[in-house]
Image (cartoon, rainbow, N blue to C red):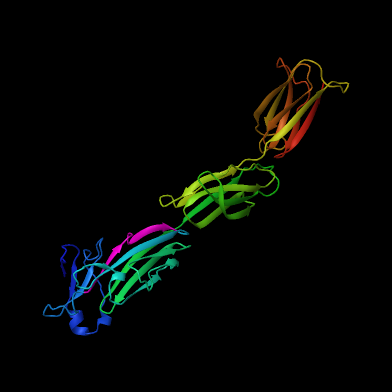
Amino acid sequence: YNVPDEAGSGGILKSVDLVRVTNDPSLWTLVPTDPEVLNATGYFIQAVDAAGNVAIASKEGFHAIIGDEPDTLQSIETTRTIDVTLEFDDGGPEGLQFAPDVTTAYSVTVNLSGESVGSIANDTCTNTNSGNCSVTITSDVPGDTILEIRLETAYTKAKFSFVTRWWAGTVDLNKKFETTPYTLGTPSASFSLNQVDQEGNLLQAVGTQDCIDGSNNCYFNWQNLPGGFYRLEETTVDPLHEMMEPLDFVIDLAHQDFHAPTIINPLLPTQLQIYKIDSNGFDWNGPELAFEIFNCGAYPDCSGPKFLAKKITILEGQSQISVTLSEGVFLVREIASNGVGPLEGDQIILIHAGESRSLTFTN
C-alpha cells in the first residue's frame, strides 16, 4: 500500500511479506500494481517487517525521474533517446541525492527485448557512476522494442520499461498501358523510388523495379519505408508509350501507406503528312482543298462504323499539310473547299504509335 513520504509527494510502497519470508535482500523486487506508484516523479521502495520496523538501517529507497514517455510510436531508421535521472534516499538528512553523492553501491543494467529487438546505438546507463544517464535505441524493421533499465543496490531492485513501437510505410502503384488492336510489342516500364528533402533534392535511392507484362498491367510495391519525403519516378518505358510525370508524396505517422492512383501510359501520337500534286506531278498550286480523316476503329479495311477524327485544309497556294493523330487505321477523303467532291478516291492507312506516315493525292 502507498503512504506519502516526508515531503508529502510521491509514495512509499511498503512490503511486509517479502522481507519476512525470504530474508534475502537479493530476491527483493518491485512489481507495482497501483499506477500511482509509477507517476511522473518515480517511486520509492521501502521494506518493513511485520512489526512495522524498517528492515534496512535507515530508509533506503530508489527514485527515478524519467525524461521521456514510457510508450511511444517512432519511424524505423530513426533513433529514440531515453534520459533517466537516478536518485537515492538513504534516510539521511539530505533526503534525495544524485547517485554520485551516495555511498551505497549500485549498478544499472540495460536490456532490449520484443518482436523488433532493434539495437542500442548509445548507452551511458550500464554500470553508470552518474545520476544522469541515457540510452539511445534504433530499429530498421517495424515492431515493438521493450527497453528495460534496471537498478540494483544491496537492498533494492527496480525496473523501468519503455516500449517503442517502430512503424514503417509502404507505397504501391498499379500501372496500365493504353493499347489498340494494332499496338506492336510488349509494354514495359521501370520505376525508381527515391527519398528526397522538402525541396525535392535527392537524399538516397530506395530502389528500382521493372515490369514487362503482356497483359498491359504492372504492379509496383515498396515496403518498410521510414518516414520522410519521397519521389516515385518512371525512368524507362517501351518506345510506344509516353512517360508519366513523377509523383511526390509523404510517409508519416498519419499517412503510413501511399496508394498511388492507377497510372495509364498513353500511346505516343502519330504524324500523317498529306501531299497534293496536280496531274502533271507538280506541287499543287490551286485553290484550297479540305480533307476529312475518319478513324476506322477495329476494322482494318474500314468496312465497319467509323467516326470523323479530324478535318483539315490545304490553303490556296500550298501543297502539303501535317496532322497529329492517334494509333489506328484511318480513311482519308479529299473534298473541295465548297463541299463538292470527292475529287479523288478515298485512301486507307494504318499508323502505329510513334510513326510518321504520308499520303499523296493527285488531281
Residue 261 visible (yes or no): no
**Residue pictured at 58% horizontal, 55% vertical:** 207
x and y percentages locating residue 232 in the rendered image: 56, 48
Q: Is residue 223 above or below residue 44?
A: above
Q: Is residue 313 above or below residue 223?
A: above
Q: Nearer the viewer, residue 309 or 67?
A: 67
x and y percentages locating residue 171 in the rendered image: 51, 52
Residue 195 visible (yes or no): yes
**Residue pictured at 19% horizontal, 79% vertical:** 57
Q: Identify the residue at the far right of this view.
A: 280
Most common SS among magenta residues? strand
Give left or right: position of 155 versus 265: left
Give left or right: position of 91 versus 212: left
What range of the chain is rendered magenta? 60-75
Q: Is residue 181 above or below residue 169?
A: above
Q: Nearer the viewer, residue 89 or 269?
A: 89
Q: Nearer the viewer, residue 297 or 282?
A: 282
